[in-house]
Amino acid sequence: MEELDQVIRSGRYEEARGRILAGEEGNADGLAALLELRDWLRLKEYDRARKLLKQEGDLMAGYLDVGQAQAALEAFESEDEGRIAAYLDDPHLGAEAWTALGLAHIRQNKREDARQAFDKALQADPRHYRAKTNLANLTLEAGYTDEAIRMYEEVLRLNPEYALAHHNLGAAYRKKGRLDKSVYHIKRGQRLQMQPAARPPRSIANTAGPPPLPERRGVLGGMGNRWWFWLLLIGAGYWLLSRQP
């Protein structure tokens, strides 16, 4: 079996999480930090990502080059295709690099190139809801309203509080003449836009992805913002023990 550290290094976070929850020893704190980084990248919250890299880069240093990750954020913001291209194959940054490249293509009116870039982003990270939203936007723009609605609804299953998806879904429903749904989603999007950016909520029971990490260290002190991960491990341990003959 492939070493757990190598699984994390290759960006296969869910596989690594499953193995740790099954009782295998591994760097749970490092994995949790990488999961948090991925969440901020999906949201395009680059300042939050920078803060995380600065504060907890030591936990991720065994898996990615922290300095390179900081440079990648600058490249994504630059919209320079050449600079962005350097990170397309990175197991931790690649999905966001493809998304940034797609946005750069859109600004140059290269719609088909943008579509291909967003497809590549979703191949690297199938739950990258911002990439899927941009793909849905292109689909709506091309006149495929029903397909765009389906895609926006998929986005909201991944992150029910993603304001842009609500707003654009409302616009799509308006094109269909569904004013009730249009008004609901546009108002929901407006309310969410007035709130501070937050990582998407996830149920602890949701095996499709890990639960969220608190943004700051809290009352648990030394356990820091990884408390949820250790609670899951403890719970898994009790479950396994209870099944012993």
Image (tube, rainbow, N blue to C red):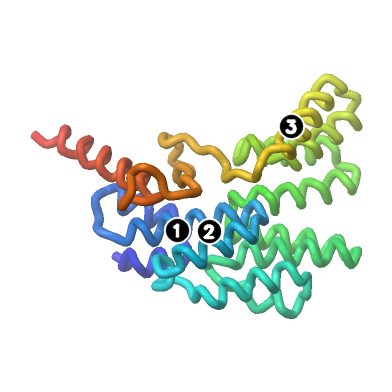
Q: Residue 14 location, x and y as percent?
A: 43, 52
**Residue at position x 51%, y 66% from top?**
53
Q: Give 234 or 48, whichever is nearer the viewer.
A: 48
Which residue is the site of mark 2? 37
- Residue 128 position in % (x across, y down): 62, 52
Q: Earlier in the sequence, mark 3 or mark 1?
A: 1
Contact, mark 1 vs mark 2 (Cβ under 8 Å): yes
Res. 58 mark: none
Numbered mark located on residue 33 in the image: 1
The residue at which mark 3 appears reads as 191
SS for dot 1: helix
Which three-letter amino acid code belongs to the residue tagged 2?
Leu
Question: At which x and y percent is residue 34?
Answer: 47, 60
Q: CA distance from mark 3 to mark 1?
A: 29 Å
Looking at the image, the residue that sits furthest to the left is 245
Q: Residue at x 83, y 66 (%)?
A: 105
What's the residue type where badge 1 is placed? Ala
